Amino acid sequence: MQGPAYGLEPYAMAGDIYSQPPHVGRGGWSWYTGAAAWLHRAAVESMFGLQQGAQSLSLRPCLPSHWDEAELSLRRGELTLRFILVRSGAATALAAASHALGGVQARLLWPGEALDWAHLTRSASFVVPLLELPAPMQSEAPAAATEPV
């Protein structure tokens, strides 16, 4: 019986996969590339829409539609920030966050709203309501076709 071809720990991210015999399909360079860190960063930046700049940060979430909520903790220097993203309106999201935080007050943060690093307290919690936007109105008449110019 042959073992799995990948041959790496399930939590290790391969820097490459061999394509030549005798190691076809085997992962390599798993502890040298930082590939797992880059994958983690890509996931956080794409799903949570985390954008960090020198002066501010913001979230523009794009969570999978079947996720009702998600949480992100961010540490930077002396700051510890906690973001709870809830697929609901502002009032419901604040109530859910208050419950999740054990009664600790969370500030409402709208998607895309910038937080200024200089004005953040050492430890802060935020709730981000993720509202589903209604489908665009479709007119009964099809739009007129235009000729390319």
Image (cartoon, grey):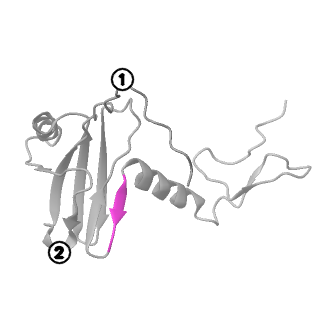
User: Bounds of the magenta span?
Assistant: 49-53
| Residue extending furthest toward the top | 140
Image quadrant in which the C terminus is located: bottom right
> How far across and down, in percent of the image, does residue 73 sit?
29, 54
Q: Residue at x 25, y 69 (%)?
A: 56
Does 146 appear in magenta?
A: no
Looking at the picture, which amino acid does disc 1 mark? Glu
141 relative to 115 in the view: left or right: right
Label whose residue precedes the other's in the sequence (2 or 1): 2
> How far across and down, in percent of the image, does residue 48 sit?
36, 50
How busy is the neighbourhood of tag 2: few (under 14 within 10 Å), some, or many (20 plus)? few
Q: Residue at x 42, y 56 (%)?
A: 45
> How far across and down, in percent of the image, does residue 135 sit?
32, 30
Label 2 or label 1, whichever lies nearer to me, is: 1
As helix, strand or loop, the secondary structure at mark 2 comes to: helix
| Residue 140 disc label | 1
Q: Residue at x 38, y 41 (%)?
A: 63
How busy is the neighbourhood of tag 1: few (under 14 within 10 Å), some, or many (20 plus)? few
Looking at the picture, which amino acid does disc 2 mark? Ala
Image quadrant in which the N terminus is located: top right
Q: Main secondary structure of the magenta part?
A: strand
Q: Quadrant of residue 55?
A: bottom left
> How far across and down, in percent of the image, does residue 127 sit?
18, 46
| Residue 118 disc label | 2
Q: Nearer the viewer, residue 140 or 56?
A: 140
| Residue 60 disc label | none
Q: Quadrant of residue 14?
A: bottom right
Asked whether the residues under the numbered discs 2 and 1 touch, taking CB atoms below 8 Å apart as contact, a structural biologist would say no
Vertical arrangement, residue 87 with respect to residue 7, above or below: above
